[in-house]
Amino acid sequence: MPNLLSRSVFNLFFGARRKALASLPGPQPGILGTAGDFLEGLPAWDVCARYGREYGGVTLIWMLGNPALVLNDPDLIEQVLVSRRMEFEKGSVSEEIKPSTTHHALFIAKQSEDWAAKRRADPFEQPWFGDWLAAQVGPMQAAVARSVESLDGAPIELTPVLRRMTFDAFAVASVGETLPDSVFEDWMLLAKGADNRIQAKLPLRFVSPPKGFEAARERFYGHFAERVRKARQAPNPDAADLLSRTLREVPGINDEVLAHVLGHVFFGGVFSSSTTLVGAYHQLQKHPEAEQRLAAEAAELAREKLTFERLRNAHWIEAVAYESLRILPAVRIFTRTPTNDVKLAGVTLPAGTTLMISNQHLHRDPSHWTHPDTFDPSRWLDGGVARDPLGSGHFFPFGRGPRECVGAAFSMVFLQTALATIAARTKVHVDSTEPFEEGFFFGVVLPKGVTGRFVSR
Ligand code: HEM
C-alpha cells in the first residue's frame, strides 16, 4: 500500500475522478496510481487473477491518473464482449500490431467500421470451412511426424521447437507445403517488431522497428502474393490447402486480400497454439497417469489412418487439449475500451478507459471448478465439454462472442492432431517442471527455458 503522502498527492490531483468511481473496489492508489502492482515482477495475468480473488468481479485500478477496470466477472465480460460489444473497441493493441500486419487483418478491424464485412468474408467463416478443416488432419499429421523424426531424441528447448513445428503444420494447411527458413525468420522479425510496440514503456512514436523490418515485411507478404499469383496461373484441382480451396470456392476474391489472410494465419495462431502445447507437456510430465492415457489413445488411433472423424472420437486427447487451454490459457488478458462514455458496473466510465479482461481467474474459480489448480482432463469427459463450452462464462481461452477467435476450430484440430501424432511416436520428457517461468511475446504467454527430449516409444 502506498504511504500517506503518496496517497494524498494522488487524491490532490485526481480526487474528483476517484469520487465518481468510488463505488468500485480496488487497491489504494498512490502517486503512480496502482501501476506499482504491475511493476513488482509478477506477470500481469497473475496480478489480474489476484484482483479477482481479492476484490471480486470488477477491480478499479489507476494507471497514473487514468482509471482502468480489471474484469473477472462472467456477466460483465458477457456485456463487454457479447451483448454490448458495439460500445467497445479493441484499443491500443490495434495500433501496436498494425505495422506488422496489414489493413486486411481481421484481428485489428474496428467494429464500428470494417469488422463485420471482414469477418463475413474470412475463409474460416465460409460454409465449406468444415470440409476444408477435415481435410487438414492428414497433411498436418504428416508435417508434425516429420518434425518429430528430425528431432531424433536430441535435447531441445520446447518453446522454439514446438513453435517451428506449429508453423510448419500451419504452412501445410495454408499453402500445401512447408515454407523456407527465410519466411519463418521474416515472420519472427515482424512479430518482434509488434512485440516491441506491445511491451513499449514509451509512446509508440518513440519505438523504432527492428533492423530490416520493412524489407522483411515486403518479403513476407510478397511471398504469399507470389503463391496466389502462381496458384491462379496453374490451379491444382486436387489440392486441399486453404489457398487452393479458397480460389476454387471464391474465385473472385481479391489477390491481395487472400495473400494477407494467408500471412495472418501465422500471426493469429502459431504463438498461441505452440504455447498451449508447451503447457500441455509441462502438465503431462506432472501427471503421468494422464500422459499414459494419452499414449494409449494415440496408439489406438495410430492403428489406422488418422481422420477428422476418428480424431473427433478421441475423447481423452480432446480433454487434454481443453484442460491445457483451461489451466494455462495462451492468451490470458485481452482489452477493450469504450468509444464513448458508458455505464458499466454501476458507474460512468469515460471514453477510452482501458478494460482488462482476464480469463485466468475464472478458469480456476473454486466456486465453479473442483480442484481448479489440478490438471485433470477427466473433468471434460461425460458431458464436461457441454457443461463449459468454449466461449462460456468460466472457459473462454479463445475469447467470447462474435469476436471470438476465428481460428478456434482450426486450433483445436491442430492441437489434437499434434498431441495424437507426437504421443503415438514419442514420450515428451520435460527435464524439470519447476519453476515454470512464463514471459510474454506478441500478446501471448511465452513459456521460458522448458527443456526436454522427445523419447521414442
Ligand atoms: C490456441 C490457439 C489460439 C488462442 C488461445 C487464441 C486466442 C484468441 C483470443 C482470446 C481472441 C479474442 C481476442 C479479443 O477478443 O480481443 C482471438 C481472436 C482472434 N484469433 Fe485467435 N487464438 C488462437 C489461434 C488462432 C489461429 C490459429 C488463428 C488464425 C487462423 C487465430 C486468429 C484470430 C483472429 C483473426 C482473431 C480476431 C477475430 C475477430 O476479431 O473477429 N487465432 N484469438
Image (tube, rainbow, N blue to C red):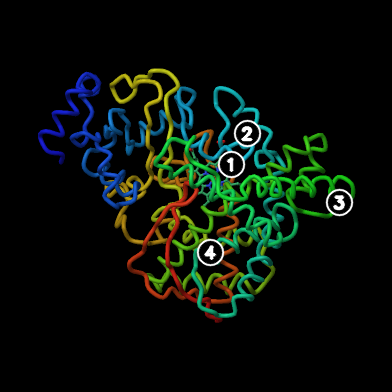
Q: Vertically, is 173 above or below 421?
A: above
Q: Vertically, is 314 above or below 121?
A: below
Which residue is nearer to you in this view: 47 or 144? Answer: 47
Does ligand 1 reach within 8 Å of label 4's beta carbon?
Answer: no
Q: What residue type is labelled 1?
A: Val
Residue position marked by numbered label 3 in the rendering: 237
**Which residue corresponds to the image point at 43% horizontal and 45% vertical from the top-left?**
199
Rendered image quadrant of residue 373: bottom left
Q: Which amino acid does label 3 sit on?
A: Pro
Mark with earlier residue (1, 4): 4
Mark with earlier residue (2, 1): 2
Residue position marked by numbered label 2 in the rendering: 119
Mark with earlier residue (3, 4): 4
* Residue 140 rendering spot, x and y as whole percentages: 66, 61
Does ligand 1 reach within 8 Å of label 2's beta carbon?
Answer: yes
Q: What residue type is labelled 2?
A: Arg
Q: How many marks on residues?
A: 4
- Label 4, label 2: how far apart the Cα atoms are: 31 Å
Residue position marked by numbered label 1 in the rendering: 406
Which residue is nearer to you in this view: 103 or 48? Answer: 103
Mark with earlier residue (3, 2): 2
Q: What residue type is labelled 4?
A: Pro
Residue position marked by numbered label 4 in the rendering: 160
Q: Is mark 3 on a helix, strand or loop?
A: loop
**Which residue corresponds to the image point at 52% horizontal and 43% vertical from the top-left?**
208
Q: Are marks 2 and 1 in contact (CB under 8 Å)?
A: yes
Badge 1 crowding class, 10 Å Cα cut-off, few under 14, some 14 to 19, many 20 or more, is many
Does ligand 1 reach within 8 Å of label 1's beta carbon?
Answer: yes
Q: Is mark 1 on a helix, strand or loop?
A: loop
